[in-house]
Amino acid sequence: MNRFALALSIIIVLLDSISISAQNYFPPRGKWETRTPQSLGLNAAKIDIAVKFALDNEYSGSKDSRIASYEGFSSEPYHELVGPTRERGGPAGVILKNGYIVAQWGDVKRVDMTHSVTKSYLSTVAGLALDEGLIGSVHDKVSDYVWDNTFDGAHNQKIEWHTLLNQSSAWSGTLFGMQDWADRPPRRGGIDDWRFEKPVPSGTVMEYNDVRVNVLAYSLLQVWRKPLPQVLKEYIMDPIGASTTWRWFGYENSWVNVDGINMQSVTGGGHSGGGVFISALDHARFGLLFLNEGNWNGNQLISKNWVGEVQKSSEANASYGYLWWLNRGPRKWKEVDDESIYFAAGFGGNFIVIDKKNDLVVVTRWLEPNKIGPMMSLVLEATK
């Protein structure tokens, strides 16, 4: 090999090494490297426009989470707050490119409620249970694992992990004093209509329902036999270098006896209080893990297979996977064509958006919920 060819091969290897390094930056605990947008091929001016849009379109609900909850779910009979809440902060967020911070706004270290973004953390705990062999298949009947009266009856006994995870289980009953039918009831009819309506067959209709998501959390507690926050901390949050400030709460009456120890069954959101309380920066680490298909700096924390499974459209709703939203189907953002994008979403405009095609993670908090599509369109303009 002549000198020119040798030098060229060395340059190619070095460029490849730089490229791989740029695509696989993983921030150590307590630190995060910031890069300018232009250094990673983004248009800095357009990133600034996207950030300004987020700041200008703050969620219009009350900063008092109690008031926002009661106003947001005022159509629900018997709705009450039985878990902790916290007054929210202002708009905040972070944009990652190849793992590096290219933009941030607001107080990104502030711990806030994140409402139904919690569901995507709960989904992760379910995926870990499959990885560990605690659950054999998502198509197993949950009643084979949880043999108390939670899944009694011909209807509930047919429910699979699969349908609990994609919110099409149609589970019927009461958990921790909350009835399934009272959560986000139909606009038509009244209490008698809702209470006595026959459940649809499991797997046929996607219904956003926190009581049923909490049934999933309760069932996973029975499988893991230790608190789910402890599972998430050990398997995910500590390995990705998350701070020590995040918390995951249940209700004041959701304590259950597991192997003689009193444990709290956590919630899948903040609908009635509780759920994950967390900072934007810790959200970003979680999003970065999924951007890298469950791998964190060479360690496969959750299987690549599970990361793929959460992105598959459910039979009942093409816009929903395993407790993650998908940018396709009836809920597709009209401003964004890319149907491979998926995201966690919560009440009050909390989002973790994963864009594998462009190596982006976007975390935004307290954004008017119907503005997420336009905002992502502005972010994506910066990649062109």
Image (cartoon, rainbow, N blue to C red):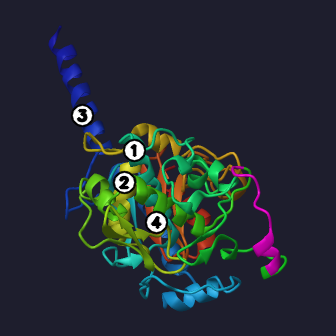
Instruction: Report the mark closest to the observer, 4 or 3.
Output: 4
Q: CA distance from mark 2 to mark 1?
A: 7 Å
Instruction: Report the mark closest to the observer, 2 or 4.
Output: 2
Q: Quadrant of residue 220?
A: bottom left
Give the amino acid at mark 1. Leu
Q: CA distance from mark 3 to mark 2?
A: 41 Å
Instruction: Give the vertical position of 265 relative to 285 (above or below).
Output: below
* Residue range of the region highlighted in magenta in the rendering: 192-203
**Labels 4 and 1: the sequence-earlier one:** 4
Give the amino acid at mark 4. Thr
SS at badge 4: helix
Give the amino acid at mark 2. Trp
- Report if the CB atoms under discs 2 and 1 are less than 8 Å apart: yes
Q: Residue at x 70, y 54 (%)?
A: 155
Residue 224 image position (x, y, % from top left): 36, 54
The N terminus lies in quadrant: top left
Residue 258 image position (x, y, % from top left): 36, 63
Q: Residue at label 2?
A: 224
**Labels 3 and 1: the sequence-earlier one:** 3
Residue 186 image position (x, y, % from top left): 77, 73
Image disc number at residue 383: none
